[in-house]
Amino acid sequence: MKITVSGYYGFGNTGDEAIALAIVRELKALGHLPTLLSQTPSETARLYGCRAAARMRPLPLVRSLAGSEVLLSGGGGLLQDKTSRRTLTYYLSVIRLARRLGKRAVVFNQSIGPLSAAGGEQVAETLRGCRVIVRDRGSLDTLARLGVKGAMLGGDPALLLEPTERLKRHDDAVVLAPRGDVTDSTERLKVLAAQLKQRGRRVVALSLYPHEDDAAAHSLGADAVISTTQPQVALDAIAAAGAVVGVRLHALILAAAVGTPFVGVSYDPKINGFCADAGAISLPTAFEMRELLPLVLERRQPNWSAVIEMKGRARASFRWALEKG
């Protein structure tokens, strides 16, 4: 089956690239041929061994959709207008175009929102009659408020990634993953890093979106800084650590994937949604050090049974998305 995948691919965001890697691997394992819509199609095709098309060029976009049977819109947090109205307009337009061409369009393991009133109306109208799979229960609630019925609960595809074999875990290492545009949490992470080092922990700052996060990561005073757009590099850094504190959602998702305890710092409902589903703790960006520090030192565990269920839903969601009817 020929499948087009629409997402935030080719922009150097490690979280979205982790989703791309997982989707391509799963679809190829199932015998399907994916084409990713990407900002840098030649690079995406080289990295993942798949087909790719330019996401913003009309002719390659239309050709990709016309030559496919199914559009997967996702994963990620695509259907929101918090960052800009144009973001929502683009992803909804791709869904509408696929349907006009007679293709099945599936919203695939997305978070839904935040949405303005106008944005919510657009989402509700566009998704009417679509198969919808979301990655957290909060998104199910959002869709229910919008009147979108029948949505299914899946899981983020990056949960299916695995670390390099025989990687050694160092329980005294703590990964901090800041987000460059959430400055109040960065200032607090600096204090956290200093206090962890005073207690003999090795602090690793992880920049998952280098052009946005590098300055924040280097400002933390960590023992080491890892700046990468490669999912496997990030995954292995997290798998080798004893705990993760993440402002970036995929620092938490990759931690769940490899069994590393994690705490979320929530600048967005998708952080709360993932942590709630995983039985993990999320704190506000203006967190209290006396609350966060013990969680990290004690390596507070999420609900690993819930994480296993999330992984199962993530894998099953590929079947749900592609089956007809």
Image (cartoon, helix red, strand yellow):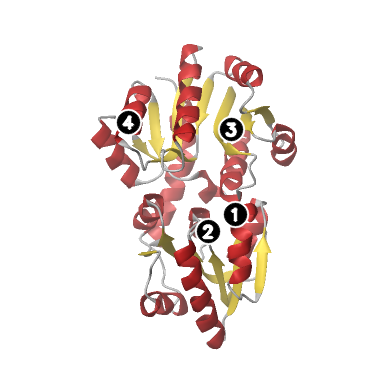
Q: Rate crowding at label 1 as few (under 14), some (14 to 19) or many (20 or more) other CA atoms within 10 Å.
A: some
Of label 2 and label 3, which has the lower sequence position? Answer: 3
Q: Position of residue 304 (x, y in %)?
A: 41, 61
As measured in the structure, the alpha-carbon distance from the residue carrying label 2 to the one carrying label 1 is 7 Å
Amino acid tagged 3: Leu
Q: Mark number for residue 118?
A: 4
Which part of the image, by quadrant, shows the N terminus? top right
Q: Position of residue 14 (x, y in %)?
A: 61, 50
Q: Rate crowding at label 3 as few (under 14), some (14 to 19) or many (20 or more) other CA atoms within 10 Å.
A: few
As measured in the structure, the alpha-carbon distance from the residue carrying label 1 to the one carrying label 3 is 35 Å
* Residue that carries the numbered disc 1 in the rendered image: 212
CB atoms of marks 2 and 1 within 8 Å: yes
Image quadrant assignment for residue 80: top left
Amino acid tagged 4: Ala
CB atoms of marks 1 and 3 within 8 Å: no
* Residue that carries the numbered disc 3 in the rendered image: 30
Image quadrant assignment for residue 172: bottom right
Q: Mark number for residue 179?
A: 2
Of label 2 and label 1, which has the lower sequence position? Answer: 2
Q: Position of residue 125 (x, y in %)?
A: 33, 23
Rendered position, 95 above or below 18: above
